[in-house]
Amino acid sequence: MSIPRLFVPGEALREGSEVALTPPQAHHLGTVLRRAAGDACRAFNGEAGEFAAEITALKRDRGALRLGARLRRGPETPSGATLILCALKREAMEWAVGKATELGAERVRVALSRRCVATVANAERLAAIARGAAEQSERLTVPEVEPPRPLHAILDSWEHGRLLVAAERRDAPPLHTLLTDARAPLSLLVGPEGGFDGRELDDLARRAFVSPCSLGPRILRAETAAVAGLGAIVFALDAARGTVLSER
């Protein structure tokens, strides 16, 4: 039986301390995973690292852990990669956020563009998806998931370095040719199901920090493009740092 991992934000975790569970964590441990007081788990965050832990109390939506030995030290080196994904339908959006977390995205931003089928995105729900994916993928950090904003507002306030844009219907260099000198921070923008419209592409082309790129000869679904492109970026940044993304 695998040992569950729990993200504990904002805590100065240390051996021997007791940590209160949030109601969702207590519910998940007790109702979903059928754990009980005395069972083992893990507690972690990006600053303190990861600790062995024991459930000391668990009842409905309440519970507590006692921390044991530190298993991994923090802080965890951030990937430097951001995914900006135009709002998709709920299932596709949640899938993409989970996979982006597994790949190591430091931040996920939701953009609203002219051809978005979805006009809203539940940032709280997406943050919970990211937290669960971080717990399962053995990350120490959880990516920041920002509430939806109009695409032009994100671009107008840009301060995150180079932005690569998946522009499948315009001539653009292959993504891998733009990653030969990858440096963090580096972001990927993927459009909605219907793609960017011409005015949006023209606006992107005028911005000095934007580089259009191609993900290959085939037209990909937005969530597929997000995972394929982000994966390439994270691997390139890891290679530049001399680290390797491992398969769990």
Image (cartoon, rainbow, N blue to C red):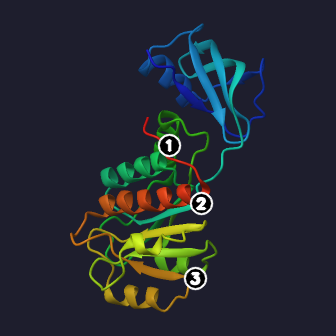
Identified at 31% across, 54% down, the residue is: 92
Residue located beneath label 1 in the image: 128
4 in relation to 108, above or below? above
Identified at 29% across, 67% down, the residue is: 117
Rendered location of residue 11, percent (x, y):
74, 35
Q: CA distance from mark 1 to mark 2?
A: 21 Å
Rendered location of residue 26, percent (x, y):
55, 23
Q: Observer-nearest residue: 195 or 241?
A: 241
221 in relation to 20, above or below? below
Rendered location of residue 43, percent (x, y):
63, 27
Where the N terminus falls, by quadrant?
top left
Q: Observer-nearest residue: 26 or 228?
A: 228
Q: Please indicate, yes or no, whether residue 72 appears anywhere in the rendered image.
A: yes
Identify residue type, mark 1. Answer: Ala
Mark 3 or 2, nearer chain start: 2
130 in relation to 13, above or below? below
Which element type, helix, strand or loop, lies under badge 3?
Answer: helix
Mark 3 or 1, nearer chain start: 1
Which element type, helix, strand or loop, lies under badge 1?
Answer: helix
Residue located beneath label 2 in the image: 80
- Determine the residue located farthest toward the left in the rendered image: 218
Identified at 48% across, 48% down, the residue is: 101
Q: Are marks 3 and 1 in contact (CB under 8 Å)?
A: no
Residue located beneath label 3 in the image: 156
Q: Residues within 10 Å of mark 3 (few under 14, many from 20)?
A: few
| Position of residue 172 in the picture relative to residue 44 (left or right) | left
Q: Residues within 10 Å of mark 2 (few under 14, many from 20)?
A: many
Where the C terminus falls, by quadrant?
top left
| Position of residue 62 in the picture relative to residue 193 (left or right) | right
Mark 1 or 2, nearer chain start: 2
Q: Please indicate, yes or no, whether residue 145 appears anywhere in the rendered image.
A: no
